[in-house]
């Protein structure tokens, strides 16, 4: 048994999933990703980026994985159950006082979804930042959301899942910290920390966040 913590929606998705094998999308020493009903669920070592669609462990290195499955609402890596001991908050902090700004045009969104390399293309990361800031500001973007959802088949399952998370206001800790630090002396340092996440993911998230904040009239660091 491996004890894990989980975001609330990840726990709910596992509990509602039927028993049976699930496809392993990616396996490595820091992260394993599986397909649970068309949604990407991760299992992370403590060095991995804490994406909001993943179970978190305290392991420095994850065990080698041949297969995965769901049994009684519990994800198993091979025959090892991942028992959820606590929930983690992955929601964005509230950004009060923002007013709706200009929405992204359909052509802009079409030019972003799936654009870039890797498990999370840069264009998707930028959209995640833009969407998550609007959720933090309490501003709905139904037209943008619908367009993004219609294009999710263009990108990786992990990236599509993270876009869904962003539309629900669920983010990595570095992004939440950056938003919480807006307008404080720590803002620049928090922006640098966010930008350093992943290969290009953090830079994409930051670019999208700043674009949204500018549209909404939020403070943007120079």
Image (cartoon, rainbow, N blue to C red):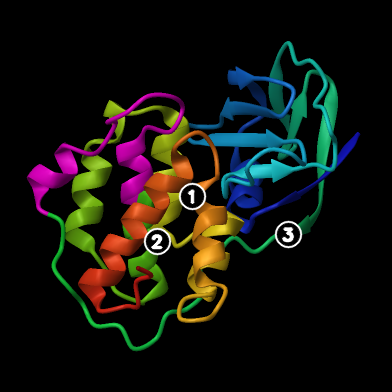
Q: Is residue 193 visible?
A: yes
Left or right of 101, for residue 59: right
* Percent x, y of residue 23: 58, 18
Q: Measure the alpha-carbon separation of dots 1 and 3.
A: 26 Å
Q: Earlier in the sequence, mark 1 or mark 2?
A: 2
Locate the N terminus by quadrant.
top right
Instruction: Check residue 195 in the rendering and tell me which mark sits there, or answer none.
Output: 1
Q: Which residue is mark 3?
A: 87
Compared with 11, 78 (above or below) is above
Residue at disc 3, secondary structure: strand
Q: Residue furthest right?
A: 1
Is residue 123 highlighted in magenta? yes
Is residue 103 highlighted in magenta? no
Left or right of 55, for residue 123: left
Q: Earlier in the sequence, mark 1 or mark 3?
A: 3
Q: Nearer the viewer, residue 174 or 186?
A: 186
Quadrant in the rendering for residue 125: top left
The region drawn magenta spans 105-127
Residue at disc 2, secondary structure: helix
Quadrant in the rendering for residue 222: bottom left
Q: Residue furthest bottom?
A: 97
């Amino acid at each position: 048994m491996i004890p894990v913590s989980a975001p609330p929606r990840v726990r709910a998705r596992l509990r509602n999933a039927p028993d049976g094998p699930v496809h392993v999308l990616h396996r490595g020493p820091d992260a394993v990703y599986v397909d649970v009903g068309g949604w990407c669920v991760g299992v992370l070592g403590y060095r991995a980026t804490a994406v909001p669609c993943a179970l978190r462990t305290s392991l420095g290195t994850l065990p080698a994985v041949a297969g995965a499955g769901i049994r009684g609402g519990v994800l198993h890596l091979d025959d090892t159950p991942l028992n959820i001991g606590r929930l983690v908050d992955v929601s964005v902090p509230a950004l009060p006082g923002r007013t709706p700004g200009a929405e992204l045009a359909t052509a802009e969104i079409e030019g972003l979804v799936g654009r870039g390399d890797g498990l999370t293309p840069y264009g998707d990361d930028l959209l995640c930042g833009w969407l998550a800031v609007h959720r933090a500001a309490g501003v709905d973007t139904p037209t943008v959301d619908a367009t993004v959802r219609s294009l999710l088949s263009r990108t990786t399952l992990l990236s599509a899942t993270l876009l869904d998370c962003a539309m629900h206001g669920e983010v990595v800790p570095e992004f939440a910290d950056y938003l919480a630090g807006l307008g404080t002396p720590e803002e620049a340092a928090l922006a640098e920390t966010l930008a350093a996440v992943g290969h290009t993911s953090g830079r994409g998230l930051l670019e999208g966040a700043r674009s949204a904040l500018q549209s909404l009239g939020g403070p943007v660091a120079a």
